[in-house]
Image: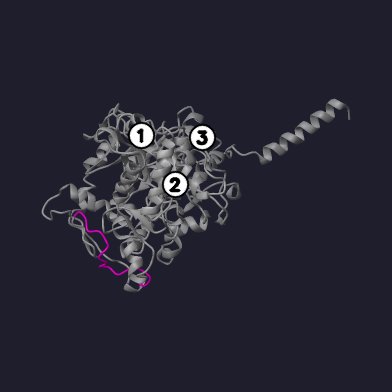
Amino acid sequence: MNHRSRFLAIALIAQLILNHFSFGFPPPEAPSLVVVISLDQFPYQYIPRFSSHFGAGGFRRLLENGANFTNASYKHGMNLTGPGHAVILSGAYGNANGIICNNWYDIDRHRGVYCVADSTVSLVGVRGNGVSPANFIGSTFGDELRLASGFRSKVISISNKDRAAILLGGKFANAAFWEQDSLFVTSSYYAPSLPAWAAQFNDQGEFTRYFGKWWRQDLPESAFNALDRDDAPYEADEDGFGKTFPHHITGEDTTRITSSYYHALIRSPYGAKVLAEFAKAAVHGEQLGQRGVTDLLCISFSSTDYVGHAFGPHSREILEITVAIDSILSDLLRYLDNVAGPGKYVVALTSDHGVAPIPEYIKAHVPRADVGRISSDSVAAVERALTKTFGPPPGGRRWVEAVADRYLYLDQSTLIQKKLDAARVARVAADVLVKVAPLTAAFTRAELQSPSPTSLLAQYSSRSYYPQRSGDILVVPKPFYFGGSEPTGTTHGEPYDYSSHVPLLIMGPGIHPGAYTGESSPADLAPTLSVLFGVEFPAGREGRVLSEALK
């Protein structure tokens, strides 16, 4: 064999090896539809705790026929709706995609900023403040899918919440829809008017037909042995919903429909049913998965979040809503089987965050437990300490200009007029906060910019830091503590497993079923889908390819 022949043979072998091990090329018959489902405020613990009550076609179908990543958790400091949904299909955290919180403070314009606010656009279908993905930085799997297909692929994203629909959909989505009282609406960012199928759905009265219905306890009393009692005083009673079963879905006025009715509706399985029916209408109206090109449908169910906030993760209501969601998922998967064909589509299920236990629930069983709610008195302590150290602020101003989520923003004009170094002032304030409040840490801007390599907590917090949007100090409560003055209900957000550990299930062609216990994250979903469908990774992604589950 001459040198040229030997070279060609080696090159051919190398190419064959490269083709065998390369990722990023879709199978010959790529699935025509991808469905990404987010269950808002749905910690992983609900899967094993409630699995005995699941039917065959919902969670159990995904668990038995898909890849179950049992150790999937967010690696950022803000486990909130906006940041979580921004991660799921971008594979990037707030330090890259800019969505650090649900709300932050614009220190230059002296005003709060909602994560999807956009004054250059308007709502379509109803009056209200404009929203869009303008504040999101980078791209999503859906954006890259549209680019790769010459914009022939469609991306449709729906939710009960605007920020969930918008941030899942990405920059190039064909449309995002969300609930506004009795309607699904969108933004002029996507289109000047609602598509005919969406307008027709709104006219059918799906939202109003549940007025006066009851959400009853369906499971036997024995199902609640490991849960809290039904009349716990620390559960929240809002919008005429009540704290015990059965819950009357009327809102505060039992004789007519008011805005409080729609709030009660979303806090029940009926709100999730309406969203699922709208998802079916979107598939039919847009002919998703039926056009010879791969489409993406994103669905974020918010009802689990509203129930969780009011009743907590150990309530009867959370078990009942989970079982109801299981039934809704089963029905939705059957519908997709009929449209795309069984085994002809990819479905992924995850959540944007988990939830903290209600402190009073823990104290009812362990009275001396170190748990609780953090009052706003901490800011007053910072004001006093900084005044004692540096003198009073000039002209009646304050040291702390604003608080947004867990960020404190120092008054920059005070620092300038007193010619003080911001880092030094922030350090004094952080030291005070840790002394007066039940905090694990208070990180300054300087610490978030250069986190300690040995501190996972600092590294996670730094992924929720974006210089132009973050404050000067980020506080991290101790485990089982959270901020808020309300004496009932619970919340989420802290970088602990109860807020960060969520399901990650993927089922469909190219996915090897099984339980995978290795370290993973919802940030890994987008790059894994990119490989599965042969499109470019989202810009700025940090997540890895879940190659262990790829056939």
Task: Identify the residue position indicated by label 2 in the image.
Answer: 77
Q: Nearer the viewer, residue 540 or 12?
A: 540
Three-letter amino acid code of the residue under disc 1: Ala
Query: Quadrant of the image for the N terminus?
Result: top right
Which element type, helix, strand or loop, lies under badge 3?
A: loop
Q: Which mark is residue 61?
A: none
Was residue 237 drawn as part of the magenta stretch in this picture? yes
The amino acid sitting under disc 2 is Gly
Q: Main secondary structure of the magenta part?
A: loop
- Residue 158 seen in this snapshot: no
Q: Amino acid at mark 3?
A: Gly
- Which mark is in front, 3 or 2? 2
Local crowd at mark 2 within 10 Å, few (<14), some, or many (≥20)?
many
Indicate which disc, 3 or 2, sits on the residue closer to the N terminus: 2
Dividing the picture into quadrants, the one containing residue 181 is top left
Q: Position of residue 316 (x, y in %)?
A: 32, 65
Q: Is residue 457 left or right of residue 376?
A: right
- Marks 3/2: CA distance? 18 Å
Write down the residue under mark 3.
540
Q: Which residue is mark 1?
A: 175
Magenta residues (range): 225-239
